[in-house]
Image (tube, grey):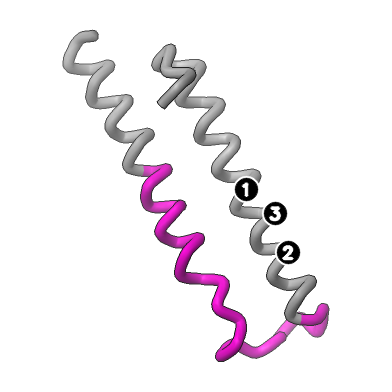
Amino acid sequence: MDDYDAGQKRGYNNALRILREFDKKVFDLTDSDDIYNVGKSNLYNIQKDFLHEIYGAIKKDKEEYTDDQFN
């Protein structure tokens, strides 16, 4: 693995780490308002689904461009 590939892999890993940290922090709905009037449970599920889609897209891109299917 050359420096470019190592840097690219590190960038993907950082993006995934940041997304996981965001996922842990953003979904405390006890103090937030339901501004969309969908119900807090539905809002939680919508947000989780959205983050899951982003996470999956980053993982897929990482696997495609770094041959890193296991980390």
Tell me the element at label 1. Answer: helix
Q: Which residue is mark 1?
A: 52
Q: Is residue 18 left or right of residue 31?
A: left
Residue 24 picture location, percent across and down: 47, 64
Query: Farthest residue in the top direction?
Result: 1
What residue is drawn where x is 73% and y is 72%? 43
What residue is drawn where x is 37% and y is 47%? 17
What residue is drawn where x is 74% and y is 80%? 40
Looking at the picture, which amino acid does disc 3 mark? Answer: Asp
Is 16 magenta? The answer is yes
Task: In the rendered view, tell whether residue 57 sits above or below residue 5.
Answer: below
In the rendered structure, which segment of residues is drawn in magenta?
A: 15-39
Cα separation, mark 3 vs mark 2, equals 6 Å
Question: What's the mark number on residue 49?
Answer: 3
Cα separation, mark 1 vs mark 3, equals 5 Å
Quarter occupied by residue 32:
bottom right
Residue 44 picture location, percent across and down: 69, 70
Q: Which residue is mark 2?
A: 45
Q: Are marks 3 and 2 in contact (CB under 8 Å)?
A: yes
Task: In the rendered view, tell whether residue 4 sits above or below residue 16.
Answer: above
Name which of mark 2 and mark 1 comes first in the sequence.
2
Q: Are marks 2 and 1 in contact (CB under 8 Å)?
A: no
Cα separation, mark 2 vs mark 1, equals 10 Å
Q: How many marks?
A: 3
Is 10 magenta? The answer is no
